[in-house]
Image (cartoon, helix red, strand yellow):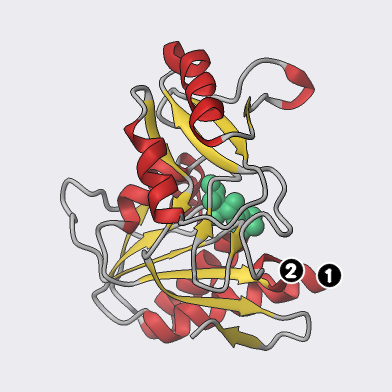
Amino acid sequence: MGSLDIAKKAAAFKAVDEYVKDNDIIGIGSGSTIIYAVERLAERVEKEHLRLVCVPTSFQAKQLIRQYKLTLGELDTHPELNCVIDGADEVDSNMNIIKGGGGCLTQEKIVASCTERLIIIADYTKKVSYLGEQYTKGVPVEVIPLAWVPVRKKIEKLLGGQADLRMAKMKAGPVITDNGNFILDWKFPPSEYNWQEVNEKLTMIPGVVETGLFVNMAIQVLYGLSDGSVQRHI
Ligand code: 5RP
């Protein structure tokens, strides 16, 4: 296993061991790090006979829950979650977070809003002092397809930078989210941002469904390191 996977696994296992207990309703995030969390949940269910309900944040998460034979729940029946475990693309020193590299930002944010305990798991490369330091793909913004051109223009006029339509591999067409929408990746110009304000400005644009900016949402970020140890954000 490479050092990145050692780090992802360490963060994921630590989160499941520390934050999950019997009878919990757990939100399951998306991405490659979350796979290790689901693996650990399944191990604990088998060994400790935990009774858990897992609420997915994406089609991928739903498939993982099924694959590992965990109990699948939904927000209709479980609108309040004991905790949500999810990954991140970048986390700054104030715990402002960019998510949505995998395109699941809207459902991830909805599920995260249903708990008071959003726990982010990430490998050590995701920890930065300011957003955009390492992750150069920008802030993902999910848009209603018919609005993508006006939304792009409005973002660039209001906030500068460049908002690019996310394309599928081989430029086969735009990436379509689990909700049937497009994604604009807003490459923001270097500046000192108030990310709460930026998020509000973006979400006020008609046609924007949600952004990948998670501000004041996570209560903890666990960073896995290459030696298998885990560093806490706070
Ligand atoms: C998907 C996400 C992921 O959580 C984020 O991209 C991190 O993924 P990974 O664990 O593969 O690094 O926000 O929309």
Pointer 2 residue: 5
Q: Nearer the viewer, residue 197 or 131?
A: 197
Q: Is residue 164 above or below residue 15?
A: above
Q: Is residue 118 above or below residue 30?
A: below
Q: Is residue 102 above or below residue 179?
A: below
Q: Nearer the viewer, residue 90 or 53?
A: 90
Residue type highlighted by circle 1:
Gly
Pointer 1 residue: 2
Q: Quadrant of residue 189?
A: top right
Residue type highlighted by circle 2:
Asp
The quadrant of the picture occupied by the N terminus is bottom right
Residue visible at 58% across and 60% down? 35
Question: Does dot 2 land on a helix, a strand or a loop?
Answer: helix
Mark 1 beta carbon near ligand 1 (under 8 Å): no
Q: Is residue 56 above or below residue 97?
A: above
Tell me, yes or no, whether the two marked residues, 2 and 1, touch with CB atoms within 8 Å: yes
Residue visible at 49% across and 63% down? 96
Residue visible at 71% across and 59% down? 133
Q: Residues within 10 Å of mark 1 (few under 14, many from 20)?
A: few
Question: Does dot 1 land on a helix, a strand or a loop?
Answer: loop
Residue 214, position as x, y percentages in the image: 43, 56
Q: Residues within 10 Å of mark 2 (few under 14, many from 20)?
A: some
Residue 92, position as x, y percentages in the image: 58, 67
